[in-house]
């Protein structure tokens, strides 16, 4: 009897194998790959994204007053934000100054010294945070009011709801020039950071944003969430925007306050891999910090790095930093040259084949299939 059962069992196994081989009976379902998450991408964006060029007369005076080395670092500019987004920028950087009454930064010093001063920009006279690089020497901006910058970004995002998540990097500017006649820049405190968060929320809805609270969920800390459960899936994050405060440890501590993991805050913060609120890192040297970037990305953190800085790589047509940035796995690679500067025609920073977003080379190199995660430039 046992032998008969064995024979019947063997026959059943052989029949099942034949049916599977013939495609008539499904075999064991293959293990599904985990879904791509928002930190499984790589994309490109711009540094000081709002910046307009310094006029030639002012640049000449700046070179005379401060020298060519410093002036060269300021000799770049960007197109309006919506055009950059159309062109595939998915990281934008805004430098934000406090101006609760309005008018504080309406008459910068360099144009006054150069004889190029014009009537104040009406936006400069309105209350609210202002976006510019340097209050006295490099104040021209494609969107002067912070809330206007946010409205431009939101309007573009609403028109393109399938975009990969856009990272908005915030520098909280509170230093000015020491020259006589310079504007006194206001200092950030906890109340100023509260008001900055409030301006973001006045434009962007909870459905527009990815915040520390959303990512942390029920985890004990933000860090634990990103290195265990992970960031939201890419499908969940498409069409959304998140912010990172890119500042020094004292200013980050002021923004954090008594919060363990940025509870209630809009922005993630730049810190280190061991902090309870660790989720995002600014690591701007993809050559010297390459191993650290790769380790942080592999562990689950989101990293922004720079393909070029201070116009140096463009002037030398030197691709080494750019290529190190891409190879590092940093999710967001920032540049001043998504668009070619006619003075440096050989230098430009784009992902291969001009796509907007691709699979992260450290986290997900084999998981994207044949196409990009977001195609190239569009209107």
Image (spheres, helix red, strand yellow):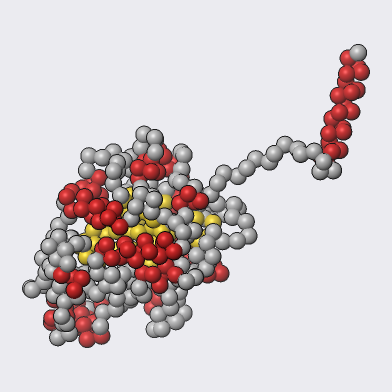
Indicate whether 313 appears above or below 168: below
Residue 367 on image: x %, y %:
59, 52
Query: Going by the image, does 44 lie left or right of 352?
Result: left
Residue, far top: 1
Decide if residue 154 is in sight here.
Answer: yes
* Number of callouts: 0
Image quarter where the N terminus lies is top right
Q: Is residue 378 left or right of residue 212?
A: right
* 83 lies above or below 372: below
Q: Position of residue 110 (x, y in %)?
A: 16, 78
- Across and down, in percent, residue 121 comes to 19, 75
Q: Quadrant of residue 85?
A: bottom left
Horizontally, residue 232 falls left or right of residue 35, namely: left
Task: Residue at 31%, 51% (x, y): give it.
Answer: 267
Q: Residue at x 13, y 82 (%)?
A: 113
User: Along the line of sight, which residue is nearer the eye, 350 or 30?
Assistant: 30
Residue depicted at x 21% and y 50%: 194
Which is nearer the eye, 100 or 88?
A: 100
Q: Does 136 appear above or below 159?
A: below
* Res 304 visible: no
Q: Is residue 51 above or below residue 275?
A: below
Question: Within the image, what quadrant is residue 91 found in?
Answer: bottom left
Q: Position of residue 223 (x, y in %)?
A: 38, 41
Residue 65 lies in quadrant: bottom left
Could you tell me which residue is drawn at 55 percent across and 52 percent down?
A: 364
């Amino acid at each position: 009897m046992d032998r008969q059962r064995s024979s019947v069992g063997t026959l059943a196994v052989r029949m099942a194998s034949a049916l599977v081989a013939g495609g008539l009976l499904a075999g064991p379902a293959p293990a599904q790959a985990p879904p791509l998450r928002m930190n499984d991408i790589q994309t490109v964006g711009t540094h000081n994204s709002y910046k307009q060029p310094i006029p030639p007369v002012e640049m000449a005076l700046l070179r005379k007053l401060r020298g060519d080395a410093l002036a060269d670092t300021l000799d770049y500019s960007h197109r309006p934000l919506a055009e950059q987004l159309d062109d595939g920028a998915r990281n934008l950087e805004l430098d934000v100054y406090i101006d609760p009454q309005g008018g504080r930064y309406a008459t910068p010093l360099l144009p006054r010294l150069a004889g190029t001063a014009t009537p104040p920009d009406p936006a400069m006279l309105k209350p609210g945070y202002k976006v510019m690089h340097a209050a006295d020497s490099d104040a021209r901006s494609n969107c002067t009011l912070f809330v206007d910058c946010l409205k431009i970004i939101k309007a573009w995002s609403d028109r393109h709801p399938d975009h990969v998540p856009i990272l908005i990097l915030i520098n909280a500017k509170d230093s000015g020039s020491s020259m006589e006649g310079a504007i006194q820049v206001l200092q950030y405190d906890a109340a100023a950071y509260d008001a900055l968060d409030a301006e973001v929320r006045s434009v962007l809805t909870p459905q527009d944003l990815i915040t520390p609270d959303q990512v942390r969920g029920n985890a004990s800390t933000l860090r634990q969430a990103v290195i265990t459960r992970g960031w939201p899936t890419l499908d969940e994050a498409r069409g959304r925007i998140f912010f990172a405060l890119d500042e020094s440890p004292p200013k980050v501590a002021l923004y954090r306050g008594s919060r363990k993991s940025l509870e209630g805050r809009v922005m993630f913060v730049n810190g280190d891999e061991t902090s309870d609120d660790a989720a995002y890192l600014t690591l701007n040297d993809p050559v010297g910090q390459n191993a650290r970037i790769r380790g942080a990305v592999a562990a689950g953190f989101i990293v922004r790095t720079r393909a070029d800085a201070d116009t140096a790589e463009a002037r030398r047509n030197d691709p080494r930093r750019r290529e190190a940035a891409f190879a590092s796995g940093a999710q967001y690679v920032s540049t001043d040259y998504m668009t070619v500067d006619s003075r440096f025609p050989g230098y430009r920073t784009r992902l291969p084949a001009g796509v907007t977003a691709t699979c992260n080379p450290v986290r997900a190199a084999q998981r994207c299939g044949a196409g990009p995660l977001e195609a190239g430039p569009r209107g």
